């Protein structure tokens, strides 16, 4: 049986920080090297599985489940504590499946997993939108932290809010957050960065410089990774 633990590389930062650009460059490099990297975008409560579940609930319980998007019905529903906690509980279980099972499986198969957003990005989201619930105190969150694989390299790209807004306007991003929300999100990232979760990078630097630095980190990880091994039912002599 083939044993070859794949790398786990994650990218974090506010919208407009340059995550997508750097991820694309890294994915292109890995594919040119003959790898078949797995790209994964996750956001607690908005994963493909969670979205399918919400669509199903809207069909069978139309009067209870609010329509998607920012609207008065959704705001009214989330004013209820039990609705918030149910939503958060399902979101955490969903992430347990993705991080605790799927990511581990891909790595076990020797695949390089590249994540656009990861565990701590979800905590930033929950702090911003469900601050009154203190999700980080829940046993389910602690279980998620325990079962989520640690990245081999985690990059946090930081840019000022004004630069992020300028970039999002250039891209014509239709669902961008307000500057005030981006500022709150940036403050959360800067606070969490003190815990040492990430390699912090200035997203205002030239794209090529950042890409070169990221590739150096990834290449050094691949060089220090032990080679794949094989085993069968017969013990060594």
Image (cartoon, helix red, strand yellow):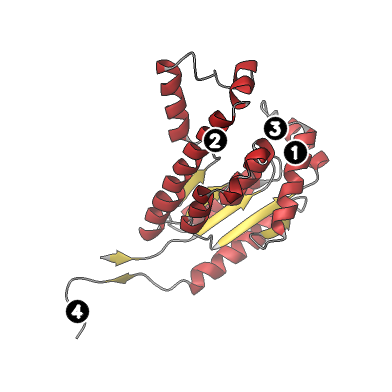
Give the residue at mark 3. 171
Mark 4 and mark 2: Cα distance apart in space = 51 Å
Whichever of labels 1 and 2 marks the residue nearer the N terminus, that label is: 2
User: Seen in the image, is 129 located left or right of residue 151?
Assistant: right
Give the residue at mark 4. 235
Residue 182 has which mark? 1
User: Seen in the image, is 105 located left or right of residue 48?
Assistant: left
Mark 4 and mark 3: Cα distance apart in space = 58 Å
Q: Quadrant of residue 134?
A: top right
Asked if the residues shown at circle 3 and circle 1 are in contact, with their CB atoms under 8 angstroms apart, the answer is no
**Is any part of residue 132 visible from this angle?**
yes
Asked if the residues shown at circle 1 and circle 2 are in contact, with their CB atoms under 8 angstroms apart, the answer is no
Secondary structure of the residue carrying tag 2 is helix
Whichever of labels 4 and 3 marks the residue nearer the N terminus, that label is: 3
Task: Name which residue lies at 76% across and 41% down.
Answer: 184
Residue 78, x across and y down, in percent: 60, 26
Secondary structure of the residue carrying tag 4 is loop
């Amino acid at each position: 049986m083939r044993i070859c633990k794949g790398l786990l590389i994650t990218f974090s930062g506010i919208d407009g920080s340059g995550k997508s650009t750097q991820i694309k460059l890294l994915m292109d490099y890995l594919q040119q090297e003959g790898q078949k990297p797995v790209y994964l975008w996750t956001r607690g409560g908005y994963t493909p599985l969670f979205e399918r579940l919400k669509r199903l609930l809207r069909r069978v319980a139309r009067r209870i489940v609010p329509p998607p998007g920012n609207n008065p019905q959704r705001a009214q529903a989330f004013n209820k504590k039990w609705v918030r906690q149910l939503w958060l509980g399902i979101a955490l279980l969903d992430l347990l499946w993705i991080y605790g099972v799927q990511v581990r499986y891909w790595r076990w198969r020797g695949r390089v997993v590249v994540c656009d957003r990861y565990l701590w990005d979800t905590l930033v989201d929950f702090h911003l939108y469900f601050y009154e619930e203190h999700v980080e105190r829940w046993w389910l969150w602690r279980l998620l932290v325990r079962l989520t694989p640690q990245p081999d390299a985690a990059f946090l790209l930081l840019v000022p809010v004004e630069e992020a807004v300028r970039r999002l306007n250039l891209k014509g991003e239709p669902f961008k957050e307000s500057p005030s929300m981006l500022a709150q999100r940036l403050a959360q990232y800067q606070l969490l960065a003190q815990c040492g979760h990430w390699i912090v990078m200035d997203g205002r630097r030239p794209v090529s410089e950042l890409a070169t630095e990221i590739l150096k980190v990834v290449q050094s990880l691949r060089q220090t990774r032990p080679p794949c091994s094989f085993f069968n039912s017969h013990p060594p002599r």
